[in-house]
Image (spheres, helix red, strand yellow):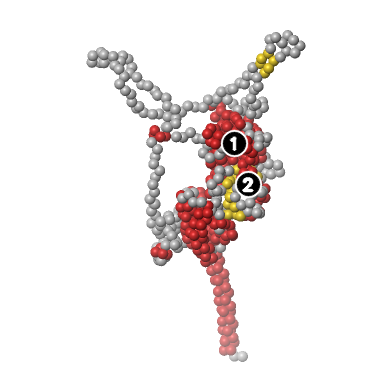
Amino acid sequence: MTAKDIQIRELKDIIIDQKQLIGALNIALTQSNAQSEQLTEQIKLLNEQLAYLKQKLFGTSSERRINDDQLSLFNEVEATQSDEITQLEVTVQSHNRKPKKLLSEKLSGIPVEQVICDIEGDKTCDQCGTELVKIGQEVVRRELEYIPAKVKVLEYVSLHYGCPECKETEEPYFEKAAVPKALMKHSIASPSSVAWVMYQKYANGLPLYRQEKDWKMYGIELSRATMANWVIYSATNYLKPLYDYCHRLLLKRDVLMADETRVQVLKEDGRNAETDSYMWLYRSGEDGLNPIILYKYCQTRAGYNALEFLKGFSGYLMTDGYSGYNKLTGIKRCCCWAHVRRYFIEAVPKGHEFNLSKPAVQGVEFCTKLFKIEEELRKKEHTPEQRRAIRLQKEKPILEAFWSWIEEQRPVRNSKFHKAILYTVNRKPYLETYLEDGRCSLSNNLSENAIRPFTIGRKGWLFCDTPAGAESSAIVYSTVEMAKAHGLNIYKYLNFLLSQRPSISMNDSELELLTPWSEAVKASCSIELK
């Protein structure tokens, strides 16, 4: 073999090695590009999550970001616009403000005490000395005076009577006047004082430790433990019979709503103090009947809690997307479109709230169209049958277009938009159930509004000490929320119930007279605004 052949062989080996090196570098470059794309996507998702958390922490909580007059997927002109137009000018819709009440209207119904300002000194004429006579008067101004509450002690004195003729006999005769039964034995609690404690905590969100300071201002020392015992005893013995009656009425309805939220109970057997328990809310729907709102305390969020509470119910149940409600059988479940819209709103990139080229904004627009139609229906007094017919005519085509649009989407995995799509697709069987009955609602907003006072109050009192306290809180919250739903003075209604003292011995006819929709209750407990 010549030197030239050896040189050619070496060059061939070098070429083979170079090719192998190039192949290895190409593989490394491909892997590096894939890793770079993965990291870029991860950074994008992290930035999306950061923007979401900033919005939750610092941004507005309103979901009304889309202007119906500005955006519409169903408008031919906007549908043909160029993708170059990405930002739309925001304008404020014209609307009529509610006229402000005059001062005289605001003060109507409030007792008036006149402060007469008379001339000091002699009422004589400076010119001729003649005595002046009254020729008129003028109301110069009005002031609203606050009169602090007062407390007093009621002593029930029983008068005793005896027969003077028989007092010297072997069987003297005497009588004692009957005394009304105490609200609680061996306690200074009265219907008015217990009702005030309940009103302050469950309507105004004032914790018992702060009420303790309030009572000291009135000159009486009441510990928070004493007030807690008052609430638990009165709720268990006097409010629960009416609560149970309303529960029986609720199960007879055809349309219900439900929601749940966390509550911390410190002293639960076999559980840590930090473990979350749950307060469930069940209420009647938009069926045109008297609203019924009931809270229920449970240790867990498991679906069997709803199954147990709603045992015997067969109808439509509007809830959020929680899968625990799937355990309910014999019902038709409706799913909330407000939650669907919320997921799409959270997926909208920051600064692109009005950019129709963004799929998330398109999803919000579909939901907004449905709510716009529902708002128009709410303004008009349609029968359930008419509402159902209008929904099938106007909303069903939007739903069909929405599901077709969903199928065309290819979201980035684990992105906010991907989660919105998954949430919606997984609940598709329940999102159209509301079309079957005009009494069903598009959203679960009524339940969320009813449970909000509990979540707000929880920020003040933070936790319940015992399960008995949590159960009592559920009963009192139910009473308070139903009083609000029927336009009653909450304190007056609580005082009324504790004075009447519902009991398990009462039949349904007697309990019906104590409900917040009873005419007698409305006459005595309505808010006095004229």
Q: Look at the image and tell me whether residue 276 can be seen.
A: no
- Residue under pointer 2: 251
Q: Quick one: SS at disc 1?
A: loop
Q: Residue furthest right?
A: 170
Viewer-nearest of labels 2 and 1? Answer: 1
- Residue under pointer 1: 513
314 displayed left or right of 120: right
Q: Look at the image and tell me whether residue 126 can be seen.
A: yes
77 displayed left or right of 164: left
> What is the crowding at mark 2: few (fewer than 14 residues within 10 Å), some, or many (at least 20)?
some
Whether residue 69 is situated above or below residue 162 in the rendered picture: below
Picture residue at 53% right of the left edge, 26% below the top: 217
320 displayed left or right of 268: left
Tell me residue 186's x, y (percent): 66, 26
Of 19 and 272, which appears nearest the observer?
272
- Residue type, mark 1 in image: Leu
Of 336 and 38, which appears nearest the observer?
336
Q: Quick one: SS at disc 2?
A: helix
